[in-house]
Image: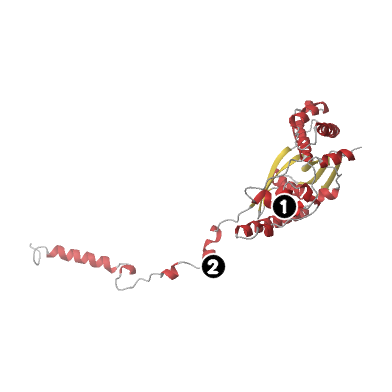
Amino acid sequence: MNPIGPPGAHHLRICRAYVARRTSVAPWWQDRHVPIERPSRASAAPSSAEQDGQLGLFAAPRRLFSCTPSRLGTYEDCPRRYRFVYVDRPSPRKGPPWAHNSLGSSVHNALKSWYALSGPERTPAALPRLLRATWVSEGYRDEAQEQQAFNRALGWLETYVDGLDPAADPVGVERVVAARTELLALSGRVDRIDQAGDELVIIDYKTGRSELTSDDARGSRALALYAYAAERVFRRRCRRVELHHLPTGTVATHEHTEESLARHVRRAEQTAQDAMDAEQAVAAGADPDEAFPATPGPICSWCDFRRSCPAGAAAPEREPWAAVERQSLAAP
């Protein structure tokens, strides 16, 4: 039977019916009679407030202030010195090395070497060799003064280790501990970490002339931050801090509380914030001397950058060996 209509008409009707069915269920955006609203260029970019709300959890994290207790202490002592050490590049030229720093470093390294020996080898007889191997000769007036300092340091060490248990291994010697707060990425190297029962003890060696008290241990920002970090690294309670003064053989101690450690951390964060604000002010064009003011005082005489600082240059100049000489005269 022939199809109705001219040849090909039947196929044309089928195609038209197919197209009709497709267009009858087409979504609104295919309807040529419905205008499509497009955002203008002005309204396309969200406001800063909208951006803040949209970013939410995806906002960039706050940059932490990387520091050691020494860095924080430098700013607290003198912002100008802090700038010379940590901000200015190139840093101003330092003065000559100090003999008292050489002496302290030598004693610290000798004790580190003593603890590196096996238990049976940890005897006072090993100390002369250890001290000689770690001795720093910089800053002394002459060989006679240096030899006198060596003998005095050896006597300190022999007296000190005589009161130690050679079989007892510390938790850490010259151990780096670290912790983070909302503002700080804190790290530091502890002279020694001992264990007392289930708790840790922070020990710091001192070789200066003055005897130390429990007030010095309580007020030491460095010891408190070491305890705070050690507790988090080792996951053990750490509240006791000790200053071991080798010249007098005395120990100054303090038992921190959670609250007292928190106070030290808050003060450290405030110092860090002040330092960051000063650095940002200089980056924005502020006068570096105004952003980092000097703190003139007796400490200026012992500053490595005294010659680069007009305020410090007014302080009396000290010879590199002056502190060692004073210590020698004060020794019995």
User: At which x and y percent is residue 215?
Assistant: 84, 50
Q: Is residue 167 above or below residue 317?
A: above
Left or right, 331 with reference to 206? right
Q: Residues within 10 Å of mark 2 (few under 14, many from 20)?
A: few
Q: Is residue 214 visible?
A: yes
Q: Which residue is mark 2?
A: 49
Q: Residue at x 89, y 39 (%)?
A: 329
- The quadrant in which residue 332 appears is top right
Q: Which residue is found at the position 83% from the left and 39% from the top?
A: 324
Amino acid type of the residue that numbered disc 1 sits on in the rendered structure: Cys
Is 174 in front, or is 23?
A: 174
**Nearer to me, 287 or 64:** 287
Above or below 119: residue 182: below
Q: Sequence-wise, which precedes: disc 2 or disc 1?
A: 2
Seen in the image, is 124 located left or right of residue 65? right
Q: Which mark is residue 152?
A: none
* Mark closer to the observer (2, 1): 1
**Mark-to-mark CA distance, 2 and 1:** 46 Å
Residue topped by disc 1: 309
| Kind of element beneath mark 1 | loop
Residue at 27%, 67% in the rendered image: 23
Query: x%, y% of residue 261?
Result: 76, 52
What x and y, as percent, mark residue 20? 24, 68
Q: How is the image coloured?
A: secondary structure
Quarter of the image where the N terminus is located? bottom left
Q: Is any part of residue 169 visible from this angle?
A: no
Q: What number of labels is visible?
A: 2
> Quarter of the image holding residue 260?
bottom right
Which quadrant of the view contains residue 158?
A: top right
Q: Residue 169's spot in the image, x, y percent?
A: 76, 33
Q: Amino acid at mark 2?
A: Ala
Residue 123 sits above or below residue 50 on the image: above
